[in-house]
Image: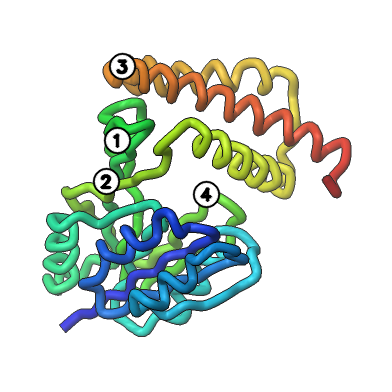
Amino acid sequence: MSTVSAVIITRNEEANIRRCLDSVAWADEIIVVDSDSTDNTRQIAAEAGAIVFEVEWRGFGQAKGYGVDRAACDWILSIDADEVVGERLADEIKAAVASGSGVAGYEIPRRTNFLGRWIKFSRWYPDYVLRLFRRDSGNFDSSLVHEKVILRGETAKLKNPLLHYSYPDIDTYFKKLEKYSSLAAQKMYDSGRRFTFTALIFKPIAAFLRHYVTGLGFLDGLEGFLIAMLSAFGVFTRYVKLRSLEKDPTG
């Protein structure tokens, strides 16, 4: 019988972690990899029965890979602290790992809640993410941000969504924007990409059109417009930070 290890990385996630852990209580093993939390995240996780590791922060890819390396089960279910596995998805995951189909990994559609509204378009849904895979067939790359699973073998898609409670309010959005834009700019700089004025002007415009027009964001109402505008601003911010890194790589 195939077993499942749920792997979660955290940093100051006491507002989310209990809900996340409750949603994967059915897993055979829960591993939490925490980096520098100053709140009650680790205590909550330990009380829920999770195996908790404390590691120095070196990026999303390395943190998730650390958890995978310490998992003991046949399958890895990687989820974030602000995500929830609903009952239907849990049942679908159990059936998939028990099927013996030979599939090495499954992509799961992710549905995001933005300012209290479940987004249906805007290129945010269905946002397929490879989060369920055989432990002996893959692991995360070491990317600082936008990490990916390097998988050996065939993939398939599940139907039921992973619920993403990422942006309960606009303050949370801007806090994440500050963090992720800095990480993205650093990744761009490290990979040899450099600032251009053309990119600063046209990349944000392209981002807006991608979300609002071709991504049908206008069908998500005001929230769809906000997503498109904020995504454009995020791209703009990323290139401004890239320019700052070029002038002073030490920050």
**Taking 75 as reference, is 165 above or below it?**
above
Any part of residue 212 in sight: yes
Pointer 4 local density, CA inside 10 Å: few below 14, some 14–19, many at least 20: some
As shown in the figure, which amino acid type bears the numbered disc 4?
Answer: His
Mark 2 highlights which residue? 109
The answer to the question of whether label 2 and label 1 lie on touching residues, with beta carbons closer than 8 A, is yes
Q: Is residue 219 above or below residue 167?
A: above
Residue where numbered disc 3 is placed: 221
Amino acid type of the residue that numbered disc 2 sits on in the rendered structure:
Pro
Q: Earlier in the sequence, mark 3 or mark 2?
A: 2
Q: Are marks 1 and 3 in contact (CB under 8 Å)?
A: no
Q: What separation in Å lies between label 4 and label 3 (alpha carbons)?
A: 27 Å
- Nearer the observer: mark 3 or 2; the answer is 3
Residue 34 on image: x %, y %: 53, 68
* Residue indicated by mark 4: 146
Q: Foreground residue, 3 or 221?
A: 221
Observer-side mark, 4 or 3, equals 3
Q: CA distance from mark 1 to mark 3?
A: 15 Å
Mark 3, residues whose alpha carbon is within 10 Å: few (<14), some, or many (≥20)?
few
Q: CA distance from mark 2 to mark 1?
A: 7 Å
Residues under labels 2 and 4: Cα distance? 17 Å
Secondary structure under badge 2?
Answer: strand
What residue is drawn where x is 58% and y is 64%?
Answer: 37
Residue shown at the point (14%, 60%) measured from the top left: 92
Pick whichever, 86 or 59, lies toward us: 86
Along the horizontal axis of the image, is 34 left or right of 50? right
Marks 1 and 4 in Cβ contact (< 8 Å): no
Q: Give the mark, 4 or 3, whose residue is nearer the N terminus.
A: 4
